Image (tube, rainbow, N blue to C red):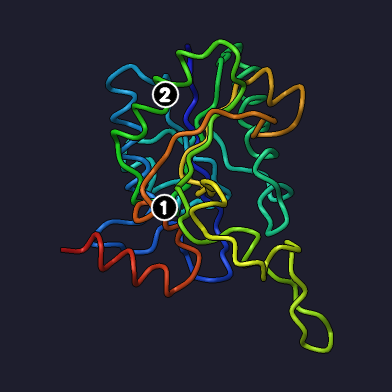
């Protein structure tokens, strides 16, 4: 199976300035994902590693790290409200115009530097072994959060329960397992992406990661936590 690995890294970010290339333990954040993708490529588990960016600075850094940056992403699909499917389809179309086709896309967000190489290998192997699955997502098992402890806030500051059984004393153990998508790994067949314009199908394969590996860097607080884990 020919897999295109896409690492998205647009220029502007609200929570952390230059987040995708911010220094993390002596490396730009994006380097963690590039290194993992290139390792997969060296083992012939994927076919190509590219960075999709609208930034010349990020392009230069990524190329110096060994990733391909065959284009600069158009501004119309690089804003805060742009969807991931837009830059994925843009990349697919770019290569198809060169008569280069892929079977699937692996999406590696730079903001998930704690994902392990072993989990990536397991994810690709699981996806390749399934003929029926159109997509795969990485998740962690949540031991506490479920709709029994979820509320909406009303205008007069009352808590409106999501689940009517929120106060019935149902134990967490009786509620069943819940898995939370962590955004670290997505794999999707190109045919599904093009036909449905979705990254995740209705019944995706699930690869479990540890909760401690699932932190997605969105805020300065997230960055501080990850630094404590990685910078030793």
Q: Residue at x 39, y 53 (%)?
A: 211
Q: Residue furthest left?
A: 232
> Residue 87 is drawn in which quadrant?
top right
> Residue 49 is drawn in which quadrant?
top left
Quadrant, the C terminus: bottom left
Across and down, in percent, residue 9 comes to 51, 50
Across and down, in percent, residue 156 comes to 83, 89
Residue in the foreground of this view, choosing between 56 and 94: 94
Residue in the foreground of this view, choosing between 17 and 188: 188
Q: Report whether 43 appears left or right of 18.
A: left
Residue in the foreground of this view, choosing between 126 and 157: 157
First in sequence: mark 1 or mark 2? Answer: 2
Q: Report whether 196 appears left or right of 211.
A: right
Disc 2 secondary structure class: helix
Q: Report whether 140 appears left or right of 146.
A: left
Q: CA distance from mark 1 to mark 2?
A: 18 Å
Across and down, in percent, residue 107 comes to 51, 36
Mark 2, other Cα within 10 Å: few <14 / some 14–19 / many ≥20: many
- Look at mark 1 in the image and give the residue it sits on: 214
Q: Report whether 48 appears left or right of 64.
A: right
Residue 197 tag number: none
Q: Residue at x 74, y 49 (%)?
A: 76
Question: Where is 67 relative to 196, above or below?
Answer: below
Across and down, in percent, residue 109 comes to 48, 46
- Look at mark 2 in the image and give the residue it sits on: 124
Q: Residue at x 71, y 34 (%)?
A: 198
Question: Where is 66 relative to 74, above or below?
Answer: above
Q: Residue at x 66, y 67 (%)?
A: 168
């Amino acid at each position: 199976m020919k897999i295109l690995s896409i690492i998205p890294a647009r220029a502007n970010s609200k929570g952390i300035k230059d987040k995708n290339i911010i220094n993390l333990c002596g490396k730009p954040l994006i380097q963690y994902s590039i290194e993992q993708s290139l390792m997969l490529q060296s083992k012939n588990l994927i076919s190509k590693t590219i960075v999709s960016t609208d930034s010349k600075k990020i392009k230069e850094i990524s190329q110096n790290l060994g990733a391909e940056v065959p284009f600069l992403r158009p501004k119309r699909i690089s804003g805060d409200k742009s969807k991931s499917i837009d830059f994925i389809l843009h990349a697919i179309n770019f290569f198809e115009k060169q008569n280069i086709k892929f079977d699937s896309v692996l999406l590696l967000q730079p903001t998930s530097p704690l994902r392990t190489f072993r989990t990536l290998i397991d994810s690709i192997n699981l996806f390749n072994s399934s003929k029926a699955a159109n997509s795969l997502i990485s998740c962690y098992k949540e031991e506490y959060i479920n709709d029994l402890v979820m509320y909406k806030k009303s205008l007069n500051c009352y808590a409106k329960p999501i689940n009517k059984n929120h106060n019935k004393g149902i134990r967490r153990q009786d509620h069943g397992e819940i898995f939370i998508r962590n955004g670290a790994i997505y794999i999707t067949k190109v045919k599904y992406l093009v036909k449905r314009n979705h990254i995740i199908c209705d019944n995706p394969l699930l690869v479990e990661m540890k909760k401690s590996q699932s932190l997605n860097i969105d805020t300065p607080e997230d960055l501080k936590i990850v630094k404590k884990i990685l910078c030793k």
